[in-house]
């Protein structure tokens, strides 16, 4: 089925600003959509309100509107641009809701704009809880017992019928916004009240609690000829009760039998057909009872989601790109797989490695926030890792999230019985620390059965944590660190730094472990992501590291530049650094081979066709140095750029240079002068700039600006109590006043008389 000839222009709606529950995955998907449409000769009208994305660059679309994504504004743009079609499935829930609003307001009909990717009816069937329940039943599957409520009174009646616990799911929201699990009336009223508020239709689904069941996802795609492929099955390590965005997830699935997987697959295909997603992708979530095997369909997203980004990067199957082509009329068998360049998109991906995603949280930024993980998403980013086994993949993913104390450690004394008892109680409530607590509990002597009873995490995964723990203790207690033991440690996902701490060498011992490892000729090799488990050769150089025997790196002729990305999104560091990295790749690619290193599946920079080579690897000193050493053998390297990926790569600059890696751009010494507060102060002093830091001194309105007062009778009035922002003075001129709080309520400050002066 060739491309449609009646579509000359398409409006693409973006996802708007990054929020918790909706990160850069829609920047990646929307950018892919714009690129595909323009390649197909179609005029692209883009509407997005986020200036920090590569998507809103002027060259990405033919007309870019950085405007609010609201019905009145969208109607004005439609009236002006007169697009033939609207593509809403690649901009997250924001875009989907906007399309629904345009349809309900009669705007699409008024201007004769066709919705492509998914019809209004299909979106409604996927998003409306009651309609979706009917689709599931018609597919021969089962939903959790549930009922719809529009008020607290209706909620209470449902609670009487089903009993507790109850799951609250608002309609037409994303990231689990307004959802949660209620164990009593107070919780139910609080969660349901918020859910009704957040739902655009004032509607919540109240369903029976299925906490503790195993959770799985399928990422599917369908074309106009009713061909359906399962792109990637994903397993949540956390059981039902933790939002999939907040859970550690893995691919492929480890605890499903083939019979169970085939059943999920059959149900998923029946649902995507029943909902009526004509073209494009969807994500379906399932719960499986660990004892009985009873399967319940949790929900469906009739659009690209966070899981789609993960599935796409995990397999090398460009979901957003293919979804866009399908929306234009192509069929799966007509679209070439870019990775192999020999198989069609109808060829289902198969992976022969393990993919692990670990979420990144920012509770330290919000001390008052509830750290309990529920069905409402709380993570602010995520990192993904690929490796040869689960333990290795998990270790890489944990160090990829770039939080020093969020990896397994065995420092200090073995946990006591009392501590183990406390840990077993603590892990009953899921938090970001749960896996660290599990590891400590196992170290202290807790049994795998006790861990399962407290968490309901599948015993297979608990066994893997126990094996990591056993290997670590073997390293810790061994008389000598032999090559065999060191390789075992690397296959268990332990970094050089972790091994150094196990051997009581501290941070400085990382170099010692690396030198020992190199003396044993024990280095990672790099394998390709090929979408087909090596059945066909991969034409695209997309790599991951593992401790195996044979590398798949290929020699190159051109001089290369390595660019270090920013790692997972976090508060204070979003996709602006992805933006700069992509631009660097585009510009440098004219004269050099570009090599991208990043571990964030949500970004444009980790698209396999963006750079000449992509390494999906942690941004740590150990991992980056191994990439540099491996690439040095493949061809000439001009150097490494660290200054475009934010603080994460910046912090590696000095160590990389010390290891002989050429750093391009700003030197590590200059970076240190800017980053180190004391050194920066010295730089200012040399230039005749003094820092104004008047804490404890009398307030001077010429040098400081009072932003608040504090009542303190113990010190003289108008004393600077706290400096929020230091000021600067050059000679007698104040360049910037200090921002301070001053005291009130104390004794009047003495003033000098004219005679004293």
Image (cartoon, helix red, strand yellow):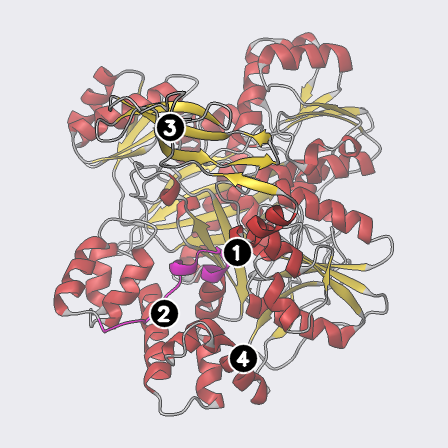
Looking at the figure, which quarter contains the C terminus? top left
**Residue at numbered disc 2:** 464
Left/right of residue 593 with respect to residue 488 in the rendered view: right
Q: Report which quarter residue 87 is drawn in.
A: top right
Mark 4 secondary-structure assignment: helix
**Residue at numbered disc 4:** 514
Q: Is residue 212 above or below residue 183?
A: below
**Residue at numbered disc 1:** 384
**Residue at numbered disc 3:** 741
Task: Give how far apart the Cα atoms at labels 2 and 1 are.
Answer: 18 Å
- Sequence-first tag of 3 and 4: 4
Left/right of residue 280 with respect to residue 737 in the rendered view: right
- Sequence-first tag of 1 and 4: 1
Mark 3 secondary-structure assignment: strand
- Sequence-first tag of 4 and 2: 2
Discs 3/1, front: 3
Mark 2 secondary-structure assignment: helix
Label 1 Cα crowd, 10 Å radius (few <14 / some 14-19 / many 20+): many
- Sequence-first tag of 3 and 1: 1
């Amino acid at each position: 089925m060739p491309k449609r000839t009646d579509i000359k222009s398409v409006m693409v709606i973006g996802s708007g600003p990054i929020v918790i529950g909706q990160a850069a995955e829609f920047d990646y998907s929307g950018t892919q959509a714009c690129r595909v449409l323009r390649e197909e000769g179609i005029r692209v009208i883009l509407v997005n309100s986020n200036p920090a994305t590569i998507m809103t660059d002027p060259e990405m679309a033919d007309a870019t509107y950085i405007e609010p994504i609201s019905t009145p504004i969208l109607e004005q743009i439609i009236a002006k641009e007169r697009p033939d079609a609207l593509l809403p499935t690649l901009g997250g829930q924001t875009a989907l809701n906007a399309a629904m609003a345009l349809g309900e307001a009669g705007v699409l009909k008024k201007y004769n704009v066709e919705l492509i990717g998914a019809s209004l009816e299909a979106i409604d069937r996927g998003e409306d809880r009651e309609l979706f329940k009917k689709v599931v039943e018609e597919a021969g599957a089962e939903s959790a017992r549930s009922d719809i409520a529009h008020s607290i009174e209706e909620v209470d009646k449902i609670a009487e019928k089903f009993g507790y616990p109850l799951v609250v799911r608002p309609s037409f929201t994303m990231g689990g916004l307004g959802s949660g699990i209620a164990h009593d009336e107070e919780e139910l009223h609080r969660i349901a009240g918020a859910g009704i508020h957040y739902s655009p239709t004032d509607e919540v689904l109240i369903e029976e609690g299925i906490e503790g069941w195993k959770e799985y996802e399928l990422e599917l795609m369908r074309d106009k000829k009713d061909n359906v492929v399962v792109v990637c099955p994903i397993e949540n390590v956390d059981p039902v009760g933790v939002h999939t965005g907040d859970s550690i997830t893995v691919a492929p699935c480890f605890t499903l039998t083939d019979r169970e997987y085939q059943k999920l697959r059959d149900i998923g295909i029946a649902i995507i057909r029943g909902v009526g997603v004509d073209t494009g992708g969807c994500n379906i979530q399932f719960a499986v009872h660990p004892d009985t095997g009873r399967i319940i369909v949790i929900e469906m997203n009739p659009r690209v989601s966070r899981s789609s980004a993960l599935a796409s990067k995990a397999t090398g199957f460009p979901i957003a790109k293919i979804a866009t082509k399908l929306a234009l009329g192509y069929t799966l068998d007509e679209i070439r797989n870019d990775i192999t360049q020999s198989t069609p998109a109808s060829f289902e991906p198969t992976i022969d490695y393990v993919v692990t995603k670990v979420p990144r949280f920012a509770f330290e930024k919000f001390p008052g926030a509830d750290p309990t993980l529920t069905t409402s998403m709380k993570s602010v980013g995520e990192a993904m890792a690929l490796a040869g086994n689960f333990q290795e993949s998990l270790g890489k993913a944990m160090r990829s999230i770039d939080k020093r104390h969020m990896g397994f450690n065995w420092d200090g004394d073995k946990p006591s019985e009392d501590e183990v008892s406390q840990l077993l109680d603590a892990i009953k409530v899921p938090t970001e620390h749960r896996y660290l607590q599990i590891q400590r509990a196992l170290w202290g002597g807790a049994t795998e059965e006790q861990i399962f009873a407290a968490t309901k995490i599948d015993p297979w995964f608990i066994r893997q944590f126990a094996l990591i723990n056993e290997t670590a203790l073997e390293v810790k207690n061994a008389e000598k660190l032999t090559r065999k033991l060191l390789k075992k440690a690397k296959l268990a996902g332990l970094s050089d730094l972790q091994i150094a701490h196990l051997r009581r060498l501290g941070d400085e011992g990382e170099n010692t472990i690396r030198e020992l490892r190199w003396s044993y000729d024990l280095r990672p090799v790099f394998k390709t992501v090929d979408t087909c488990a090596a059945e066909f050769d991969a034409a695209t150089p997309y790599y991951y590291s593992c401790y195996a025997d044979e590398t798949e790196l290929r020699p190159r002729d051109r001089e290369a530049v390595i660019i270090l990305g920013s790692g997972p999104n976090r508060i204070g560091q979003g996709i602006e650094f992805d933006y700069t990295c992509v631009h660097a790749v585009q510009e440098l690619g004219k004269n050099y081979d570009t090599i991208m290193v990043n571990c964030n599946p949500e970004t444009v920079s980790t698209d396999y066709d963006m750079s000449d080579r992509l390494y999906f690897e942690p941004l740590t000193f150990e991992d980056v140095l191994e990439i540099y050493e491996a690439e040095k053998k493949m061809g000439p390297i001009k150097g490494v750029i660290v200054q475009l990926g934010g603080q994460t790569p910046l912090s590696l600059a000095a160590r990389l240079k010390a290891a002989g890696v050429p750093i391009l751009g700003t030197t590590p010494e200059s970076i240190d002068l800017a980053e180190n507060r004391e050194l920066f102060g010295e730089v200012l002093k040399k230039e005749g700039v003094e820092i104004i830091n008047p804490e404890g001194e009398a307030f001077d309105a010429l040098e400081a600006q009072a932003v608040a007062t504090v009542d303190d009778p113990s010190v003289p009035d108008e004393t600077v109590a706290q400096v929020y922002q230091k000021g600067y003075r050059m000679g007698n001129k104040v360049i910037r006043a200090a921002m301070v709080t001053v005291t009130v309520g104390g004794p009047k400050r003495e003033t000098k008389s004219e005679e004293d002066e």
